[in-house]
Amino acid sequence: MNMPNLPNLDLQATKSVVRDHYAALSQATPQDVATILAQHIAPDCHWYGMHPFHEQTGPEAIAEAFWAPFLQAFTSVQRREDIFFAGLNEMDGFQGQWTCSMGHLMGLFDAPFLNIPATRKMGFLRYAEFNRVENGQITQSALFVDLLHLMLQAGLNPLRAPQTGVHLIQPGPMTHDGLLLSPQNAAETARSLSRINQMIGSINHANASPDPLPPEQELAQNWHDDMIWWGPAGIGATYTIDRYIEQHQGPFRRGISGRAFNGHLCRMAEGTYGGFFGWPNLTLTNTGSFMGVPENDTRADMRVVDVYRRDGDRLAENWIFIDMLHFLKMQGVDVLAEIAG
């Protein structure tokens, strides 16, 4: 692998800003959440939120779009965090300092949220969040949440076809070492980013080559045989290379065509963890009734988060978030309108 030449910068201050932000946010109410967000989020912060939250600017708009409605629906919220790390963004020449947090926002689902009926039981909103920190403030942020999974918890199944994998309350790393609150080894960071880049290159080569490697050989270059792909609701999780091919890669490649890779806004690593997000990562055409949606000629976008754990010289676990509601709505399937009746 070609190892990236990463600057040797201390990321602990960046982590502290976001940790303080999360601590303050844990005490927020619908009425004061905008004020609390403003403690650590810059007035001109650009926030990327999935459909229907869209892009927002500044704490007040972010609170109005997502946090106030969420905190009105969910009470006694806990951030059940499984992964937290910081890194330098490869996409801007390793200039930007970002953090990545992933886990579940758990609370009592006491009032409807986006037409999803309340259960008055525990609800788990699966999330991944990226934050850029500059001069002690968060200046860019991306929050991905798995709304289809929340619908399933509430007894709704708006999908056109069964999931090819299985979607559960997804656990964190098998190694239980995903909260990187202390500095990490720079060489390990470089190894993780290099392996992620090589994996991306393998996918792009397979899509572009007239004679690609068989899927098993393609994946074995970068993944352990017992890999776990923690996919989003609508697709589901798979375990081992063989089942990943059967339950996700195969259906995905048969169901879509004209896949265009648009790049990422942030790609980074720290220690044995890494990840990225794009806006959008992919543009493609559903020519094989993917996810049960009839084939069509619409060029639809996938906004995607991938978070990885590396074990030795291969990737072992991968947590994925996709803005499914946006992807489906571009094809004429408005899930939120459908569940509203």
Image (cartoon, grey):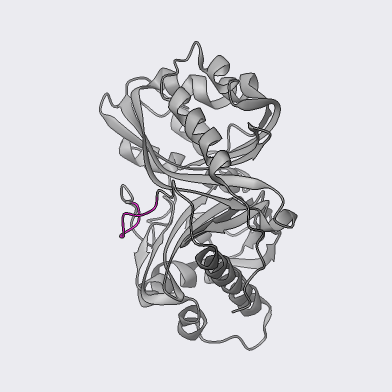
Judged left or right of residue 104, residue 18 is: right
- Relative height, residue 48 to residue 313 (above, below): above
Image point 47% across, 30% down: which residue?
A: 22
- Residue 44: x and y in percent read 73, 27
Does the magenta stretch mainly form a helix, a strand or a loop?
loop
- Residue 267: x and y in percent read 62, 56
Residue 129 counted in the magenta span: no
Judged left or right of residue 110, residue 136 is: right
Residue 241 visible in the shown view: yes
**Quarter containing the N terminus:** bottom right
Residue 130 visible in the shown view: no
Name the foreground residue: 260 vs 92. Answer: 92
- Relative height, residue 248 to residue 80 (above, below): below
- Residue 270: x and y in percent read 52, 57
**Quarter containing the C terminus:** top left
Location of residue 116 by image quarter: top left
Q: Which residues are magenta?
A: 172-178
Image point 57% across, 65% down: which residue?
A: 193
Location of residue 225 by image quarter: bottom left
Name the foreground residue: 153 vs 136. Answer: 136
